[in-house]
Image (tube, rainbow, N blue to C red):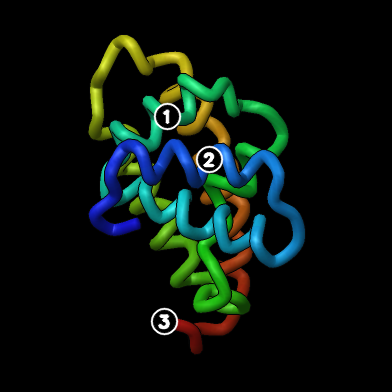
Amino acid sequence: MAAAKPAAVRLAFALFTVADGAFAEDLDVDLGGLIENDPSLFRSVLKARGDDGPALEGLLGNLGGEYVDRMAASCRALRARLRALQGVGSERLAAIRDKCIAVLKEEARQTCEIARQMPRHDT
């Protein structure tokens, strides 16, 4: 969703509510990728849908198959998502922004801690 249109993003979020298995995971990865490309759109659609429950952690932290077993790369990617969310200052979206930031901070903390404990072979 590099050049996402709001209607497409709303549709993807709507599909997310009925998706399961691999399709749900693909949506997690695609919608999560929107965080860096258009964090304001991501937050506004998330807020409009009221999606701030348990699925939020997966949505924010699922980086996709290319990051499996690559903890240092995962750490960098999660921090990039965190910076993107912190960079948009809409007061209208402050509550969902703060919740997303809290979830991502914890996910990044855990991932980066694991990365620090592992031998340096992943990039």
| Image vertical order of residue 105 relative to residue 22, above or below | above
| Residue 94 in view of the camera | yes
| Residue 112 in view of the camera | no
Disc 1 to disc 3, C-alpha distance: 32 Å
- Count of number-bearing discs: 3
Q: Residues within 10 Å of mark 3 (few under 14, many from 20)?
A: few
Q: Quadrant of the C terminus?
A: bottom left
| Image vertical order of residue 4 relative to residue 50, above or below | below
Dot 1: what SS?
helix
Along the line of sight, which residue is nearer the eye, 51 or 70?
A: 51
Disc number at residue 123? 3
Horizontal relation, residue 55 to residue 70: left or right:
right
Q: How far across and down, in percent of the image, does residue 113 sit?
A: 59, 58
The picture quadrant where one finds residue 14 is: top right
Q: Residues within 10 Å of mark 2 (few under 14, many from 20)?
A: many
Dot 3: what SS?
loop
Disc number at residue 45? 1
Residue highlighted by disc 2: 13
Residue closest to the far top:
92
The picture quadrant where one finds residue 78 is: bottom left
| Image vertical order of residue 90 relative to residue 43, above or below | above
**Amino acid at dot 1:** Val
Residue name at image x 31 percent, y 37 percent: 6
**Amino acid at dot 2:** Phe
Q: Quadrant of the N terminus?
A: bottom left
Contact check, label 2 and label 1, Cβ < 8 Å: yes
Horizontal relation, residue 69 to residue 31: left or right:
right
Q: How far across and down, in percent of the image, does residue 17 sit?
A: 67, 39
Disc 2 to disc 1, C-alpha distance: 8 Å
Residue name at image x 53 percent, y 46 percent: 60
**Amino acid at dot 3:** Thr
